Amino acid sequence: MKEIVIISGKGGTGKTSIIAAFASLAKNKVLCDADVDAADLHLIMYPDVKERHDFESGHTAIIDQGKCTQCGLCRELCRWNAISEDFVVDPIECEGCGVCYYFCPEEAIDFPLNTCGEWYLSETRFGPMAHARLGIAQENSGKLVSLIRQEGKKLAEEKKLDLVLTDGPPGIGCPVIASLGGATAVLIVTEPTVSGRHDMERVAELAAFFKIPSMVCVNKFDLNPSEGEAIEAFAKERNITVMGRVPFDPAFTKAMVQGKTIVEFDGRSKGCEAVKNIWEDLAQGLEI
Amino acid sequence: MIISIASGKGGTGKTTVATNLAVSLGSDVQILDCDVEEPNSHLFIQPTIEDVKTITTPVPEVDMKKCNLCGKCGEICQFKAIVVIGETVLPFHELCHSCGGCMEVCPEKAITETGRELGIIERGHRNGLEFVHGKLRVGEAMSPPLIRKVREYARPGTLTIIDAPPGTSCPVIASMKGADFVLLVTEPTPFGLHDLKLAVGAVRILGILCGLVINRSDMGDDQVKKYAEEEDIPVLMEIPFDRRIAEAYSRGEMIVEVMPEWKERFSELYHRIEKIAG
């Protein structure tokens, strides 16, 4: 089984629009939305949720005011300043380390498991989909990313499909690291701007660090061709496969507004033509 | 006053708004780029960097001469960052959250702390504007501790503008908590609206006042405006799609540099925020 993960470094370069187009073009695959912080793929896929599960991870301390003698040991030990002067834990600051819970001489601190999101297995018009929703202001997004990718692979095995297309998160931190391990290859979708290039270089370095083969495509290429060429030159230097250029095309936004992939919205648009070519090359290159 | 600029969805124009706002307001302003995974403000501000600091977080080191393999360190650690295996203790530094629990619990005082590099903080100036950003080390997973270090540079009595990362989880919370106002930058598309709702949820959990900037305001549909009206969130600025703005951005130029008339509009934006939050 193969898994292609789409990442970008910079947010808003078009990851989700491009993976949605791939969903229209690829056969025998599972879709996986691993951008659990701000998942958007479902806004085009309209998944019919078949299974819904709680995502439980991490703990938060709670002080029982009835048992607390206000000795102050917990406040002394807490490195997150999460306990107020009147001994109430701020759940947002609490790191879930359990040090206060462990040391409290009165056993006045409870340390329950958090429910910090939900994950789903669904059916879409393009095949099965695994997706998730991290609760607002929650931690452990990396763990949810790992979980949802595992569930995506399980789905593919059950349905005897040999490809997982994964929409990854922006950035280079914990959720991105969690989206890379074991991937067949990553496709970095970037844009021809100084920010796009800067961020692409950092995420490419991250993929190289984890030894994941990388490909790059420049979206909105004609916005600044010389920046686009600089990105491609950087890619070639680092043995990153250049997958072609996608022109700036308002059809992407129009398709999104209608809840369609660009292939469904306008198969003859220049954006669609470009994405089709990229998909064909990618499928051939990875023997999909 | 601290104004944090956030969005939910990435690529909506946070950095554009943060940098243009900062340079439009003259002196006694500082910009803190807290998008430490992918900081971009420096590409537009182009500050002269005056100092660079390496930031570390404490992680355990075990003196095996003192350790009696009791296993209490592994028991207290919630993150599986220290384990007793056979005759030795293995700390996994990259998993450690720096709570100090293992050191505290060790009856033999065999654990001391050393540092894991989180990244760097660079500080500099552009004319009267103070600039600070954090840059997460590539391969480092945890950005909130570095973000908190960047925020320590906020000077009371100064206008502090924070460029926050996208999303709605811990790095964003670390960039918004304690701000006087959150300016949410969005685009009028289904993705923009969906992620805006999540961002508003986060702002409300923190109990901070917020307002909206709608970028590329003529490109999608009117659902964002409808939502803002229903939720009583003021729309403080609209930036229409203009290829000149997009191209200037692509070259690392600010709107106020290529279209100086925008300076007035960004000052106006600040005055509106001041009226609400001041």
Image (spheres, helix red, strand yellow):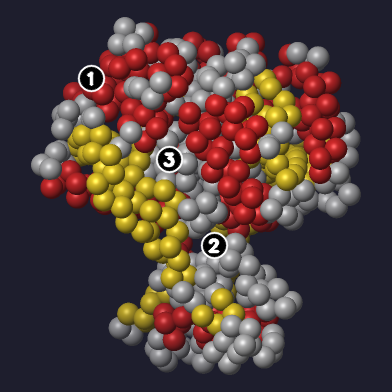
Using the image, name the chain to which the residue with label 1 belongs.
A
Q: Quadrant of the C terminus of chain A?
A: top left
Q: Residues within 10 Å of mark 2 (few under 14, many from 20)?
A: some
Q: Secondary structure at mark 3?
A: loop
Q: Taking A212 as reference, is B232 left or right? A: right
Q: Hey, what amino acid is under mark 3?
A: Ala
**Cβ–Cβ under 8 Å for marks 1 and 2:** no
Q: Hey, what amino acid is under mark 2?
A: Arg
Lower sequence index among marks 1 and 3: 3
- Considering depth in this image, is A57 or B206 the residue closer to the camera? B206
Q: Which mark is residue B116?
A: 2
Mark 1 or mark 2, whichever is nearer to me: 1
- Considering depth in this image, is B63 or A123 the residue closer to the camera? A123
Q: Secondary structure at mark 1?
A: helix
Q: Hey, what amino acid is under mark 1?
A: Glu
Q: Which residue is mark 1?
A: A280
The residue furthest left is A160
